[in-house]
Amino acid sequence: MTDVTALSPLPVNGRRFPFPVPYGWFSVGRLDELPAEAVSPLRAFGRDLVLWRDGDDHHVFDAYCPHLGAHFGHGGRVEAGCLVCPFHEWTFAADGANTGIPYADRPNRKARVRSYPTIVRNRQVLVWYHPDESVAPMWEIPEFLPEQAVECMRLTTRINSAWQEIAENSVDMAHFKYVHGVSRIADIGEMTIDGWFRRVRSTQAFQTSKGELEGQIESSSYGPGVGAVQFTLLSRVTLFSAVTPLDDGAVDVRFTMFYPEGDEIAGKIAGAFGAEIARQFAEDLPIWEHKRYQPSPALAPSEKAITEFRKWCSQFYVR
């Protein structure tokens, strides 16, 4: 299994991008990468957060206790299904409500921590974020992976960019030739947009150890943070993609590739697909890190899909 990991420091946002943090479902980590501690700090959406576990149940809260501001992620613990503050041992249930104060005869009804809807899908912990905490999750995330899926590649990278800039590459077909060296500019293929859902089906040439091979790609996006890309070449492999905004100028990217257990053909081609994805990602990285958003781009006639993509993206911002 290939494991490519490169985490750089968080940037000082130079305002290269006019977007606020989008809303949607976002990954806060693969299950096997979560800290061993039951309570741990994390950063996402421009907020300090805390991840805590009660058995197999995962919860994400705002990081600071509403009592006197202690950070739950530094010394907090889990007890009887509740998060316990390290400062005065106030306890909070999974919905964020205060359930007890050790030196009072009743809880404080006004003491509530923001709790973010949290699910496990495709071996990752996903969190629903919306700037308005009263907005419940607006769509579901399906399980893309069979139970016995075999992981064959993972890539984890922190990028000084915005999710929209990274995702726009999926409809920028010309860059595959001029950045990645494919032999021709592929057609965008069939693009379907239905509210928060977007699917693109196309054919693309891939550089492999056996030369250039042509494969079919179906890319499905479930909002800005979660997607699945299925590559078909004699058999099928699946890339689960997760892009999580740390703030409005940096993201964590997690790509994980799988193939069905027992599918020998898929197992053979998965390595080639994974290596090619890692190669192309490394070539895109310096461009993402240094480019800026061009609000009124001068496009070629074949680049209409970029305009359609940007219109789709705009629904995920609350200004």
Image (cartoon, rainbow, N blue to C red):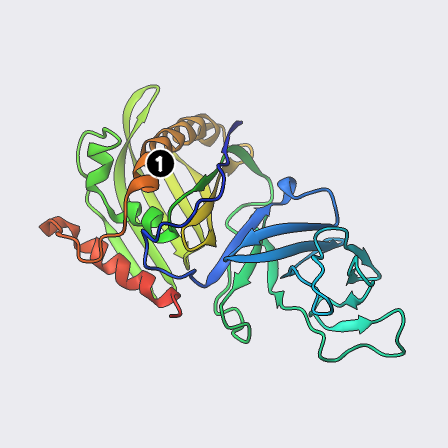
Q: Is residue 26 left or right of residue 273?
A: right
Amino acid type, mark 1: Leu
Q: Quadrant of residue 305?
A: bottom left
Tally of numbered tags: 1
- Residue 217 in the image: x percent, y percent? 33, 43
- Residue 115 in the image: x percent, y percent? 64, 66
Give whichever of 173, 29 is nearer the camera. 29
Task: Please report the residue visible at 61 percent of the width from the left and 57 percent of the height from the top.
Answer: 49
The residue tagged with tag 1: helix, strand or loop?
Answer: helix
Which quarter shows the C terminus? bottom left
Of all residues, the one furthest to the left in this rendering is: 301
Q: Is residue 205 left or right of residue 86?
A: left
Task: Please report the residue visible at 73 percent of the width from the left and 66 percent of the height from the top.
Answer: 68
Residue on which disc 1 sits? 285
Q: Is residue 43 left or right of residue 38?
A: left
Task: Please report the residue visible at 72 percent of the width from the left and 60 percent of the height from the top.
Answer: 70
Q: Is residue 84 above or below residue 203?
A: below
Q: Badge 1 local density, few (<14 within 10 Å), some, or many (20+)?
A: some
Q: Is residue 271 left or right of residue 57?
A: left
Res. 195 in view: no
Res. 51 in view: yes
- Residue 19 in the image: x percent, y percent? 35, 60
Task: Please report the residue visible at 70 percent of the width from the left and 53 percent of the height from the top.
Answer: 73
- Residue 284 in the image: x percent, y percent? 32, 36
Q: Quadrant of residue 89?
A: bottom right
Give whichever of 249, 198 is nearer the camera. 249
Q: Is residue 147 above or below residue 66?
A: above
